[in-house]
Image (cartoon, helix red, strand yellow):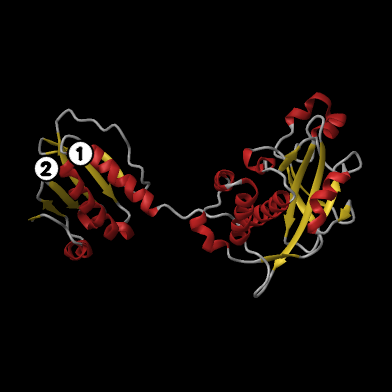
Amino acid sequence: MAQKRLSWEELRREIDAGHPGIHRIIGQPNIDVFVDEGSSRVGIRVPVEPNFTLTEASPLAQVNMSTVSVLGQTYIQVATDARQLYPEFISFINSVAERIPFQVQDPELAIIETLKAWRSLLAPLVILSDEQQIGLWGEIFLLRLMLRASKPINCWTGPLGEPHDFRIGTLEVEVKTTKSQHRLHVINGLDQLSSSIGHKLVLVSLQVAPAGAHAGESLSQLVNSTLQEATKTEGIWKSNSLRELINSIGYREEHSGFYQGPFILRTIPRAVPVDSLFPSITKGRLSQVLGNDVFRIGDVSYRIDVEGLGKEVKPESLIEEIFELV
């Protein structure tokens, strides 16, 4: 059967019956759509030169791409045996048929471009996990306080892959945020509670809770408020730089609808100097036990309860108090 376009309804009866068959889509070149015995596979064949070889593989796990020879003619064959995807595959076939006439000299490119376009279309939405949202909420909350205290945007070093979230002069700050009713925080790695040479480190502990109706701030509200603060204190160029920093750690404005749950501070923030009395696991402390073998230890993660350590500080005084602690 020859035609210019294939519909799912036309092919469905044949697939349901399990009959093998070939349908030709008329074009330059013609495209053969085949159904295997028992409808075990559906695919297309696009004619190419006899010595043709593929240069790329299919970017989709459920779609196979190869070269075959049928009755002396060489074809690029693209097929799937994922029966639940047959309706979508027919739409893909029509997309290829529409694209190939514009790339007659390179049918492989037309097929690959169509496969990649479908991969992008069907790519899962990646949003921040609950844990990542809470962690970012805490960092942005403190960043806004920093901006209001006339500290520069580039004091926020967490997005740059640094072990600590903030660095200003010789002060480093690590922010930990939890929804727990206890000040239990997860420490990742042996460096997170070690200050850089010549620096002092302070841990800021935040406890948050769902705000309920008409109260608190969501992550998206907090981000927008902080961007406005950056524009006011440092100008639009710096605000755009901050937006890029926030994007670099996975936050996207177009996903803001997923970050609408508002939070309030459950308790007054607590600022804790990370000094020799602070209970932590660090390379320095492990080396006292393991010596030079400390480098063999990696991927360390542990929980620490900082309740009663340091001092409680109201948000409006937090930045000033942090500096006084060191």
Query: What residue lies at 17% left-to-right and 51% top-to-bottom?
Result: 33
> Viewer-proximal residue, 320 or 211?
320
Given the current orientation, which residue lies at the most extreme right position? Answer: 277
Residue bearing mark 1: 107
Which residue is tagged 2? 29
Query: Splitting the image into 4 quarters, where does residue 157 fall?
Result: top right
User: Which residue does the image show at 31% across and 46% down from the upper left?
Assistant: 115
Q: Residues within 10 Å of mark 2 (few under 14, many from 20)?
A: some
Place residue 11 in its image quadrant.
Answer: bottom left
Does 31 sit left or right of 124 as displayed? left
Residue lying farthest to the top in this orientation? 292
Q: Which residue is at the front of the view, 257 or 303?
A: 257
Q: Which residue appears at 48% of the width and 57% of the height?
A: 254
Q: Residues within 10 Å of mark 1 (few under 14, many from 20)?
A: many
Marks 2 and 1 sit apart, C-alpha to C-alpha, by 9 Å
Q: Secondary structure at mark 1?
A: helix
How far across and down, in percent of the image, does residue 320 sit? 82, 49
Circles 2, 1 touching at the beta carbon (< 8 Å)? yes
